[in-house]
Image (cartoon, rainbow, N blue to C red):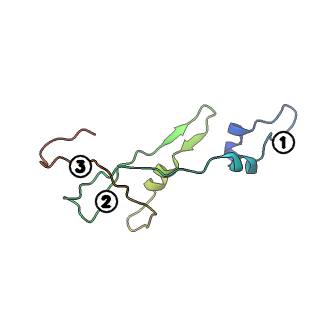
Amino acid sequence: LEDFRELFCVPIEGNHDPLITIADILVLMPRLRCRYYSISSAANTSPSEISMTVGVVNVVNNCNILVQGVCSNYLAGVHEGDIIKASIVQSSFRAPPNESHPVIM
């Protein structure tokens, strides 16, 4: 968190103490929300496996600090056999019955 200090608390000129502390920032920051991803595998072709397509977020902001997506980077680091906490939310989306029909998502 010390790397992100300049994003939140710029010291007053001549004073090296931050305007607010890292503890203050943690109290003020909202809790992380659930991330929702779409399953990219088909139940009829892979009934015992679930695949997701995730774009990993790595962006350098205007303060030249690398900001990484929390969940996308976590998922990118998961290896086969790792256990993750996840839930499946029911959706009304259904693939077309004829598998030869293309689907644009």
Residue 28 coordinates in the image, percent (x, y): 69, 46
Disc tally is 3
Find disc 2 in the rendering and name its residue: 50
Q: Residues within 10 Å of mark 1 (few under 14, many from 20)?
A: few
Nearest to the eye among marks 1 and 3: give it: 3
Find disc 3 in the rendering and name its residue: 94
Q: Residues within 10 Å of mark 3 (few under 14, many from 20)?
A: few
Q: Which mark is residue 95?
A: none
Report the quarter where the C terminus lies. top left
SS at mark 1? loop
Q: Residues within 10 Å of mark 2 (few under 14, many from 20)?
A: few
- Residue 70 is left or right of residue 19, and the answer is left
The residue sitting at 78% across, 43% down in the picture is 20
Nearest to the eye among marks 3 and 2: give it: 3
Task: Indicate which disc, 3 or 2, sits on the residue closer to the N terminus.
Answer: 2
Q: CA distance from mark 1 to mark 2?
A: 49 Å
Which residue is more in the foreground, 45 or 76?
45
SS at mark 2? loop
Residue 45 coordinates in the image, percent (x, y): 19, 58
Task: Indicate which disc, 1 or 3, sits on the residue closer to the N terminus.
Answer: 1
Find disc 1 in the rendering and name its residue: 17
Q: CA distance from mark 1 to mark 3?
A: 56 Å
Vertical relation: 5 (above or below) 45: above
- Residue 77 is left or right of residue 99, and the answer is right
Task: Indicate which disc, 1 or 2, sits on the residue closer to the N terminus.
Answer: 1
The residue sitting at 34% across, 55% down in the picture is 90
User: At label 2, which amino acid type do we have?
Assistant: Ile
User: At label 3, which amino acid type do we have?
Assistant: Arg
User: At label 1, which amino acid type do we have?
Assistant: Asp
- Residue 41 is left or right of residue 102, and the answer is right
Q: CA distance from mark 3 to mark 2?
A: 16 Å
Residue 66 coordinates in the image, percent (x, y): 57, 41
